[in-house]
């Protein structure tokens, strides 16, 4: 299931195995993937305007002061019309159209990201 042009995707998750598996699946589809294990590291990547991020996947709860909800807000500063895929321990709604997954496995997160990319490319 290859999607049009390659996208630059940021994966933020403190679980190294999950992060590596999801990144591997997305790279196999031809996407450029950047990974971060903390919100602080991801925030720096999101603020790099010379290398913009096309899509964001993040865990809601991250070590440190910056969590996934803050990262989603930062991402929406430049991509107000795109969904962030967020892994949360609890189901909750999103007024910004984010995709909230309750503790997904890598294949579920992969499908959600690819679905978001695909739906945006069809607009």
Image: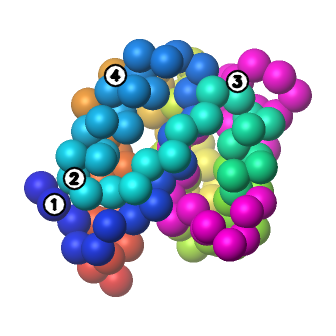
10 Å crowding of disc 2: few (<14), some (14-19), many (20+) = some
In which quadrant of the rendered view does residue 22 lie? top left
Q: Marks 3 and 4, Cα distance to the nearest angstrom?
A: 17 Å
Q: Nearer the viewer, residue 55 or 17?
A: 17
Q: Nearer the viewer, residue 84 or 100?
A: 84
**Which mark, by number, is residue 39?**
none
Q: Marks 1 and 4, Cα distance to the nearest angstrom?
A: 20 Å
Quadrant containing the C terminus in the rendered view: bottom left
Q: Earlier in the sequence, mark 2 or mark 3?
A: 2
Q: Position of residue 4 (x, y in %)?
A: 23, 73
Q: Nearer the viewer, mark 2 or mark 4?
A: 2
Segment colored magenta: 47-71
Residue bearing the label numbered 2: 29
Q: Earlier in the sequence, mark 3 or mark 4?
A: 3
In this picture, is 39 found above or below 15?
Answer: below
Q: Marks 1 and 2, Cα distance to the nearest angstrom?
A: 6 Å
Secondary structure beneath disc 3? loop
Which residue extends farthest left?
A: 1
Q: Nearer the viewer, mark 2 or mark 3?
A: 2
**Which mark, by number, is residue 2?**
1
Quadrant containing the N terminus in the rendered view: bottom left
Q: Earlier in the sequence, mark 1 or mark 3?
A: 1
Residue bearing the label numbered 3: 62
In this picture, is 95 found above or below 27?
Answer: below
């Amino acid at each position: 299931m290859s999607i049009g042009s390659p996208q630059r995707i940021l994966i933020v998750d403190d679980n190294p195995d999950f992060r590596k598996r999801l990144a591997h699946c997305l790279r196999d589809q031809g996407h450029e993937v950047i990974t971060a294990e903390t919100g602080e590291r991801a925030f720096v990547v999101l603020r790099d305007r010379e290398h913009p991020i096309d899509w964001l996947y993040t865990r809601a709860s991250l070590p440190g002061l910056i969590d996934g909800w803050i990262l989603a807000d930062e991402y929406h500063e430049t991509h107000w019309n795109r969904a962030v895929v967020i892994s949360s321990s609890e189901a909750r709604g999103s007024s910004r159209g984010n995709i909230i997954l309750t503790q997904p496995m890598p294949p579920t997160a992969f499908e959600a990201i690819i679905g978001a990319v695909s739906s945006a490319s069809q607009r």
